[in-house]
Amino acid sequence: MSDLVMLLTVFVLAIFVGFEIITKVPPTLHTPLMSGSNAISGITVIGALILAGAIDSPEVSKVLATVAVAFAAVNVVGGFLVTNRMLKMFSARKK
């Protein structure tokens, strides 16, 4: 039980720290930050696919890995769409 409490504590602290860091990012850095987020989400998709495909992993791990694949894939696709839209806005100014 203490391991679960420790893991939940780390998870909640990571949420708070991530929120505080993201809210302090200036607007000029949003596109580079999105690119970094896409790279991290791509790594998450690969790791979750490996875990979901593991033969001897528990059912809970497979369910959580499937959810992680779905959320990370949505993040990657959304990030690319936002980045593409922002790049089109910058290229439209040059013309």
Image (tube, rainbow, N blue to C red):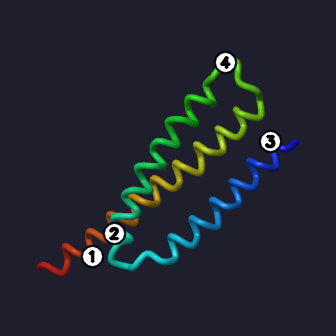
- Determine the residue positioned at 80% across, 42% down: 3
Please give the residue where the numbered disc 2 appears in the rendered image.
Answer: 85
Label whose residue precedes the other's in the sequence (4 or 1): 4
Q: Nearer the viewer, mark 4 or mark 2?
A: 4
Between 65 and 33, which is closer to the camera in this rendering? 33
Measured from the top left, where is residue 65 in percent x and y?
Answer: 65, 38
Discs 2, 1 touching: Cβ within 8 Å: yes
Left or right of residue 42: residue 49: right
Question: Residue flagged by tag 3: what amino acid is it?
Answer: Asp
Marks 2/3 in contact by CB < 8 Å: the verdict is no
Q: Secondary structure at mark 2?
A: helix
Q: Is tag 2's residue or tag 3's residue first in the polypeptide sequence?
A: 3
Density class for disc 1 (Cα within 10 Å; few <14, some 14-19, many ≥20) is few
Provide the residue designation for mark 4.
Answer: 55
Quarter of the image that includes the C terminus: bottom left
Give the CA separation, mark 2 to mark 1.
6 Å
Name the one closer to the observer, 3 or 19. 3
Badge number at residue 3: 3
Splitting the image into 4 quarters, where does residue 42 fall?
top left
Q: Residue furthest right?
A: 1
Q: Residue at horizontal 81%, vertical 44%?
A: 4
Report the disc number at residue 89: 1
**Residue drawn at 39 percent across, 79 percent down:** 26
Residue 2 lies, with reference to residue 32, above or below; the image says above
In this rendering, the label closer to the viewer, 4 or 1: 4
* Mark in the foreground, 2 or 3: 3
Callout 2, which amino acid? Arg
Q: Amino acid at mark 4?
A: Ile
